[in-house]
Image: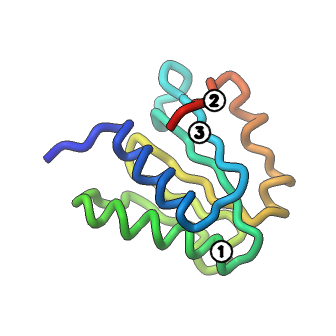
Amino acid sequence: MTITPEELLNIAVEAAEDKKANDLVVLDLRGISLVADYFVICHGNSNTQVQAIATEIRKRIHDKGVALRGLEGMDAARWVLMDIGDVVVHIFHRDEREYYNIERLWSDAKVVENV
């Protein structure tokens, strides 16, 4: 079974929302970057919440038979980076998100309104 980038995106967004991720933004990088089609950016208010969001996304993509290509930052839980192929998920601790402001770095990307 092949899963589309849009389906991956929906899985990640729903999982993050179920764990009460804050200020969830999806950037459409198609035509802008070869890194991924979409960035999902959100934050948690504690290290525990950041880890819970990442764990839920990992569980749901695994349940769909999708391999997680990379996972960084789970131990410190200040900025967790998840590579699920055409979708890259950035889960920040609130303080780190304000500091790095990666939405500004990718300001050429369109914000996806309806996920």
Q: Along the polypeptide, which appears first: circle 3 or circle 2?
A: 3
Residue shown at the point (36%, 38%) measured from the top left: 5
**Mark 1 residue type:** Gln
Element class at badge 1: helix
Element class at badge 2: strand
Q: Looking at the picture, how far across and down is residue 35, in whole percent?
A: 49, 37
Vertical position of residue 51 compared to residue 70: above or below: below
Q: Which mark is residue 111?
A: 2
Cα separation between marks 2 and 1: 24 Å
Q: Which mark is residue 32?
A: none
Q: 54 or 68, which is in the foreground?
A: 54
Quarter of the image holding residue 26? Answer: top right
Query: Mark 1 highlights which residue?
Result: 49
Query: Mark 3 highlights which residue?
Result: 26
Q: Along the polypeptide, which appears first: circle 3 or circle 1?
A: 3
Q: Are marks 3 and 2 in contact (CB under 8 Å)?
A: yes
**Mark 2 residue type:** Val
Element class at badge 3: strand
Q: 104 or 62, which is in the foreground?
A: 62
Residue shown at the point (25%, 43%) measured from the top left: 3
Q: Are marks 2 and 1 in contact (CB under 8 Å)?
A: no
**Mark 3 residue type:** Val
The number of numbered badges drawn on the structure is 3
Q: Looking at the picture, how far across and down is residue 59, in whole percent?
A: 37, 70
Q: Along the polypeptide, which appears first: circle 2 or circle 1?
A: 1
Residue shown at the point (57%, 46%) measured from the top left: 40
Q: Looking at the picture, how far across and down is residue 72, in whole percent?
A: 55, 66
- How busy is the neighbourhood of tag 1: few (under 14 within 10 Å), some, or many (20 plus)? some
Vertical position of residue 89 compared to residue 33: above or below: below
